[in-house]
Amino acid sequence: MAKVNPKVQQIRGKMKETLGKAMGDTSMQRAGRGDQLRAKAHKMTDKAAAQLRKRTGH
């Protein structure tokens, strides 16, 4: 599976959520929110890993 840039995933999720609201599709809204949450988790994980590398010198 290709790694997706978290910022792109967040934008895609926001677009999906907004489109779902406009169409009245709650499933699409949930999927969009899920994409946004995954992007946020990915960014937080990357930040934590960078901090860990910085502290351990690796």
Image: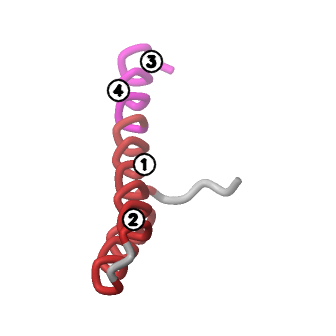
Q: Earlier in the sequence, mark 4 or mark 2?
A: 2
Q: Look at mark 3 in the image and give the residue it sits on.
A: 57
Residue assigned mark 2: 32
Q: Considering only order in the chain, which callout, 1 or 4, is on the residue closer to the N terminus?
A: 1
Q: Which residue is mark 1?
A: 38
Q: Give the labeled residue for mark 4.
A: 51
Which portion, as a residue range, is magenta? 46-58
User: Would you say 1 lies left or right of 48 here?
Assistant: right
Assess disc 2: are there few (<14), some (14-19) or many (≥20) residues with their C-alpha within 10 Å of its C-alpha: many
Query: Reading the chain from its start, which is encountered first: label 1 or label 3?
Result: 1
Residue 51 part of the magenta segment:
yes
**Numbered tag placed on residue 56 in the rendering:** none
> Which residue, as the protein is rendered here, is positioned at the far right?
1
- Vertical order, 39 against 26 (above or below): above
Q: CA distance from mark 2 to mark 3?
A: 37 Å
Asked whether 46 or 23 is in front, the reply is 23
Task: Please determine whether, in this image, residue 36 is positioned above or below residue 50.
Answer: below
Q: Secondary structure at mark 2?
A: helix
Q: Nearer the viewer, mark 4 or mark 3?
A: 4
- Chief SS of the magenta region: helix
Near mark 4 (Cα within 10 A), the count class, few <14, some 14-19 or many ≥20, is few
- Of pointers 2 and 1, the one earlier in the residue sequence: 2
Q: CA–CA distance between discs 2 and 1?
A: 10 Å
Is tag 2's residue or tag 3's residue first in the polypeptide sequence? 2
> CB under 8 Å between callouts 4 and 3?
no
Q: Quadrant of residue 25?
A: bottom left
Q: Are marks 1 and 3 in contact (CB under 8 Å)?
A: no
The image position of residue 18, as x and y in percent, is 30, 77
> Which label sits in the foreground, 4 or 1?
1
